[in-house]
Image (spheres, rainbow, N blue to C red):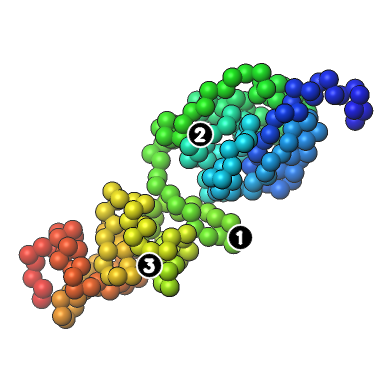
Amino acid sequence: MDAGGTEPAKGDAVSLRVVLADDEPLARKRLGRLLREAGCEVLEECAHGAAVLEWFATHREADALFLDIQMPGLTGLEVLAELKDPPPVVFVTAHIQYAIQAFEAAAVDYLLKPVSEDRLAKTLERLHHREIPRRKGPELAALLPNPAERFPVRAGEGFVFLDLRKVTHFEVCEEVVYAWAGGERYRTSWTSLAEVETAFPGDDLLRIHRHLLVRPASITGFKPLLGGRGEVRVAGGKTLEVSRGSVPKLRAILGLHGKSEN
């Protein structure tokens, strides 16, 4: 492109610093190229929603966030709901049916793939010249249907998010907390069960052993053992030991208080 012919049209976009997120490598690369050609500084290119949250946890200098709506783990709408003080957001997707939700979430614009240079130029013009009200995460979360409590777990070199309601129990081993869901174990960022209890104070998680924290709703069976101990079976078939000190409270929660031990 001839710099002399394009610079006047680009002048307003030069100062925009943007972050973009798209799980499709080719689409992510193309959007990044278009943004740079339009005069933007691309601060970060993210492959999934968790990476966006990680970046914004330590950075605040972005002028805009370009978000794909359909991504593995967290959707673009869920990412926006998690951000405490998000910059102006532009949703980029191949699906027109999400347009209403996007604008309800106070999105600046809604770009359909494949994004054209002319359409992107109009979006950048809007970003630069308008005062965009920033919506806080908790307010935005109300737009999502029954938002679940989620937490990040390791997935290769990145993260995915687990729904707490799908977790049967947490287990700590050598200062690493693992979450069990669907019969599989996932490594979390926590180092103690106390941190898990602090993260979910109102979710009735019960410490059944010094190294085990169970979600009572996932329990499918209970068996008393000698010495006042016990064991529970959780969804997926795994059996867990219950310490003697934890049995009375567990029995009460399960509605077994006063039932015969035999």
Looking at the image, residue 39 sits to the left or right of residue 248; the answer is right
Which mark, residue 157?
1
Q: Mark 2 and mark 3: span between their CA atoms? A: 33 Å
Give the camera-side residue of 64 and 106: 64
Say which amino acid is labelled 3.
Answer: Glu
Q: Earlier in the sequence, mark 1 or mark 2?
A: 2
Say which amino acid is labelled 1.
Answer: Glu
Which mark, residue 171?
3
Say which amino acid is labelled 2.
Answer: Asp
**Mark 1 in CB contact with mark 2 (< 8 angstroms):** no
Residue at image mark 2: 85
Residue 162, percent across and down?
45, 54
Q: Circle 2 sits in a helix, a strand or a loop, which is it? A: loop
Q: Earlier in the sequence, mark 2 or mark 3?
A: 2
Quadrant for the C terminus, please: bottom left
Dividing the picture into quarters, in which one does residue 53 lie?
Answer: top right
Callout 1: few (<14), some (14-19), or many (20+) C-alpha neighbours within 10 Å? few
- In this picture, is 233 found above or below 110? below
Looking at the image, residue 179 sits to the left or right of residue 262; the answer is right
Residue 99 visible? The answer is no
Residue 114, percent across and down?
73, 34
Residue drawn at (78%, 39%) of the image = 33
- In this picture, is 131 found above or below 45? above
Q: Circle 1 sits in a helix, a strand or a loop, which is it? A: loop
**Mark 2 in CB contact with mark 3 (< 8 angstroms):** no
Q: Earlier in the sequence, mark 1 or mark 3?
A: 1
Residue 142 visible? The answer is yes
Dividing the picture into quarters, in which one does residue 146 lie?
Answer: top left
